[in-house]
Every structure is written in C-alpha cells, then in structure tokens.
Image: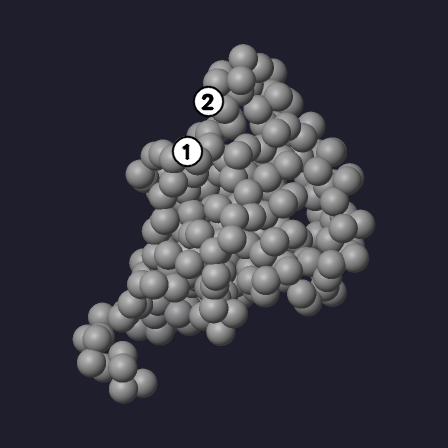
C-alpha cells in the first residue's frame, strides 16, 4: 500500500468514473451489471476517503449527455441510484458523511429526486465529509446557468456590473460553498475532462489511469494521492516563492 502524508492530503477529490461498460464487455456481462459492479467501487472509495481524512469527494455519476443513452440503460442507472441511496444512507449517518448533489436535478424523475432530497436532508448536519454527486451535470450548462442567474440579479439591481468578480460568479455555480477540486482522477484510460467542473478545475492536478472503474480500489486511490503529493503546486508563483511561504 502506498504511503501518503496525512498533512498533505487533497481537501477535495473529484473522480470521473470510467469505464463500467468496457469492464462488463471484458467480463462478458451486460452493461447494467458493469454499472452494478461500479457501485461497489463507489462504496469502497467513499469509505476510504472518509477514513483517511478527505474533506470532500465529488463523483461524476451521470452527465447531462448520458440522457441520450438507451432508455433501458438510463432507467437502470436511475434504479441503481435509488438502490444506492436506500443502502447507504445509514452508512452515511454512521460515518458522519453529508450528501450533496450538483447538476440539473429537476430533470430527474420525481421519485428519484424525492429520494435524493430526502437523503440530502437526512444527512445535512453531518460534518465528517461531503459526498457530492454530479447528476445530470454538464460543466458548460453550469456556467451558462450561473451567468444567466447573475445577469438577472444584476438587472434586478441586486448589484452593479462593476461589482462582478470571480468570487461573486462562483457563488452562482452549483458548487458554491464547496472548495475547488485539488485532485481529479479519471479511470478507464481516457485523457479528457468530459465537460466536468470546467470552471472549478483551473488549478486542479489531473491523474489518469488505465484501471477501469469497477476495478478501482483503495490501493489505486492511495497511489493517485501519493502522485498528487509529489507534485509542486505553484498557482502562478515560482518554486522559490513557494519555498518561502
């Protein structure tokens, strides 16, 4: 198991969970069974993050583009989400995990959104870790929505256009109140961000692995964190300036 420095943990890890479908093909299973296997990794990685002290974990669970997938697959994914909420709410309560969600949540079916909101409400006072699910999420959609709502408030006289700053704009994003990701992990061997947290990842460290999401386990997470800890994060400064901080 990789050794990591508890003093240098990323506060916020975001994960693009790829590729349940290819894992299913490799194991001569249907795609839906691949998604079920991927849910096991969600449970393991969430538990590990809570145990080692990660403050926030954001999982790209369902993109806005995923709605164009076959109806039976979309239905199965929504059923998996319902099952996950049913099975894991008690675990979240026992481990002091607060559930949040970002995305166009109103596009979810009423019973799915209802269960999601129930779990969010039930875990709202938990302080140990935030588990943030990106559902019906798209980064460009988020930015456009934030710009529209900010413009409406400016027209309504809530502030002047000269008052608009990047800090104010961030308050209109889905992720308001959540720190930007320090580390993005993408499984499955792809090297792109797929419309995920586009605004928030300006200074995020990227870690890509060929491991398919259903095979991603605690050791793989710790390997990613160890790699993150080896990197120098300068945020526009020089190495010499960093060493003097």
Residue at 58% across / 56% down in the picture? 49
Q: As displayed, is residue 132 above or below residue 195?
A: below
Front in this rendered view, residue 202 or 4:
4
Front in this rendered view, residue 40 or 126:
40
Residue at 31% across / 63% down in the picture? 231
Disc 1 and disc 2: Cα gap in Å? 8 Å
Q: Which residue is mark 2?
A: 22
Question: Relative to residue 25, is residue 195 drawn left or right?
Answer: left
**Residue 245 visible from this viewpoint:** yes
**Residue 62 visible from this viewpoint:** no
Kindly indicate whether the residue at mark 2 contacts the one at mark 1 (C-beta within 8 angstroms): yes
Which circle marks residue 188 in the picture?
1
Q: Quadrant of the C terminus?
A: bottom left
Residue at 58% across / 33% down in the picture? 38
Which color scheme does this rendered protein use? one colour
Question: Relative to residue 95, is residue 138 drawn left or right?
Answer: left
Residue at 53% across / 17% down in the picture? 27
Front in this rendered view, residue 216 or 203:
216
Q: Residues within 10 Å of mark 1 (few under 14, many from 20)?
A: many
Sequence-wise, which precedes: disc 1 or disc 2? 2
Which circle marks residue 33 in the picture?
none
Q: Callout 2: helix, strand or loop?
A: helix
Q: Position of residue 175 (x, y in %)?
A: 50, 57
Q: Quadrant of residue 230?
A: bottom left
Q: Position of residue 146 (x, y in %)?
A: 43, 54
Q: As displayed, is residue 56 above or below residue 65?
A: below
Q: Position of residue 204 (x, y in %)?
A: 36, 58
Q: Residues within 10 Å of mark 2 (few under 14, many from 20)?
A: some
Q: Callout 1: helix, strand or loop?
A: loop
């Amino acid at each position: 198991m990789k050794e990591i420095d508890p003093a240098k943990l990323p506060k916020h890890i975001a994960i693009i969970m790829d590729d349940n479908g290819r894992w299913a093909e490799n194991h001569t299973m249907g795609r839906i069974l691949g998604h079920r296997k991927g849910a096991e990794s969600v449970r393991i990685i969430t538990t590990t993050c809570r145990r080692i002290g990660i403050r926030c974990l954001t999982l790209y669970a369902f993109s806005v583009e995923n709605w164009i997938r076959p109806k039976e697959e979309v239905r199965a994914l929504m059923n998996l989400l319902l099952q996950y909420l049913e099975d894991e709410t008690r675990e979240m309560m026992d481990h002091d995990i607060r559930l949040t969600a970002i995305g166009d949540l109103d596009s979810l079916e009423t019973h799915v959104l209802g269960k999601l909101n129930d779990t969010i409400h039930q875990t709202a006072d938990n302080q140990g870790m935030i588990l943030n699910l990106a559902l019906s999420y798209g980064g460009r959609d988020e930015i456009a929505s934030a710009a529209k709502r900010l413009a409406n408030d400016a027209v309504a006289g809530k502030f002047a256009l000269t008052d608009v700053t990047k800090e104010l704009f961030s308050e209109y994003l889905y992720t308001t109140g959540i720190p930007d990701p320090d580390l993005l992990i993408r499984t499955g061997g792809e090297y792109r961000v797929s419309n995920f947290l586009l605004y928030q990842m300006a200074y995020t460290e990227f870690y890509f692995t060929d491991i398919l999401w259903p095979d991603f386990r605690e050791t793989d997470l710790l390997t990613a964190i160890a790699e993150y800890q080896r990197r120098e994060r300068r945020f526009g400064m020089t190495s010499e300036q960093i060493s003097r901080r």
